[in-house]
Image (cartoon, rainbow, N blue to C red):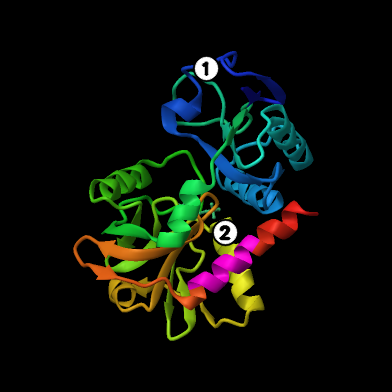
Amino acid sequence: SYVLYHDQIIKNGSIPVDPEDRGYLFGDGIYEVVFVYDSKPFAFDEHFDRFVQSANKLELALPYDIPTFKHLTDELIKKNNVQNGMVYIQMTRGVAPRNHLYERNMQSVVTGYAKSVTLESIAQSHANGIQTYLTEDIRWLRCDIKSLNLLGNVMAKRKAADYDCQEAIQHREGMVTEGSSSNVFIVKNGTLQTHPASNLILNGITRQIVLQVAKELQIPILEEAFLIDDLLGADEVFITSTTMEVTPVVKLKGQQEQSYKIGPVTSELQKHFKAKIQNSAST
Ligand code: PLP
């Protein structure tokens, strides 16, 4: 396969890995995951808007402009012959002797790869829904930055899997924030509700597109934090992410348990989200 290193697409295995890269030492870096449908990156501009925002929040310097990132992403997809799959792009602050204090003028290190995925397991989750595990959100207070620091997310996902769940639903003192790698929505009496885009969640690109779709469908929207009790009392629950699109939740496990049916609002949003993918693939 071929990978991205700085601004070069090169054969995998030939990237020099520097142990003093701050990405390794401190998790000092950011990333994006973009899905590829029909050999085209979906919502590239939205993902790289967020990439730039994450970079700015951490004072990371972009080594080249966004059109260059776009060109390199397209090249990665082409070189690896990816029809349906994903592209991962990472940027660390770069290489320097280990010191917590960072300098602002460092040379960022960009790496990336593209992989094909089979759409079967996601289709399975869409048809049957997934089980989720309710767990405390132990992460830091800048979850709006898509940084490489993901230990809280990783631990939540492991815990969920240990209870036979595909995703964790995290809460801060009873207030539901988001999944370990997804955003969480509930539907109650026809109203769609999700945590507002604050420092406590990552403002998912899928989340933003789903809210846009809901607006177009004139589904009432509440961007306000909700409680575990609201989650338990919801008519429908679903999660959103680049890799899971709109996935219904049929079970909540953990300190409190609940079962859900795949509801009409979830199905409608899922259908229209897929239509958006189709539209962008055909243009
Ligand atoms: N929240 C977290 C913590 C995530 O890691 C992700 C994606 O991986 C999301 C939400 C969903 O974001 P997006 O829809 O941009 O993939």
Magenta span: helix, strand or loop, mainly?
Answer: helix
Q: Measured along the vertical axis of the image, is residue 83 above or below residue 261?
A: above
Q: Which residue is mark 2?
A: 206
Q: Residue furthest left?
A: 255
Residue 40 image-quadrant placement: top right
User: Taking 110 as reference, is 99 left or right?
Assistant: left
Q: Position of residue 272 (x, y in %)?
A: 62, 68
Q: Residue at x 64, y 23 (%)?
A: 2
Tell me which numbered mark, 1 or 2, is placed earlier along the sequence. 1
- SS at mark 1 in the image: loop
Position of the N terminus, as image quadrant, is top right
User: Taking 193 as reference, is 91 left or right?
Assistant: right
| Marking on residue 17 | 1
Q: Amino acid at mark 2?
A: Thr
Residue 113 image-quadrant placement: top right
Q: Position of residue 93 (x, y in %)?
A: 56, 31
Residue 272: within the magenta? yes
Q: Within 8 Å of ligand 1, the CB of disc 1?
A: no
Q: Position of residue 227 (x, y in %)?
A: 32, 73
Q: Amino acid at mark 1?
A: Val
Q: Which residues are magenta?
A: 266-274
Residue 253: tell me if it is visible. Answer: yes
Residue 223: tell me if it is visible. Answer: no
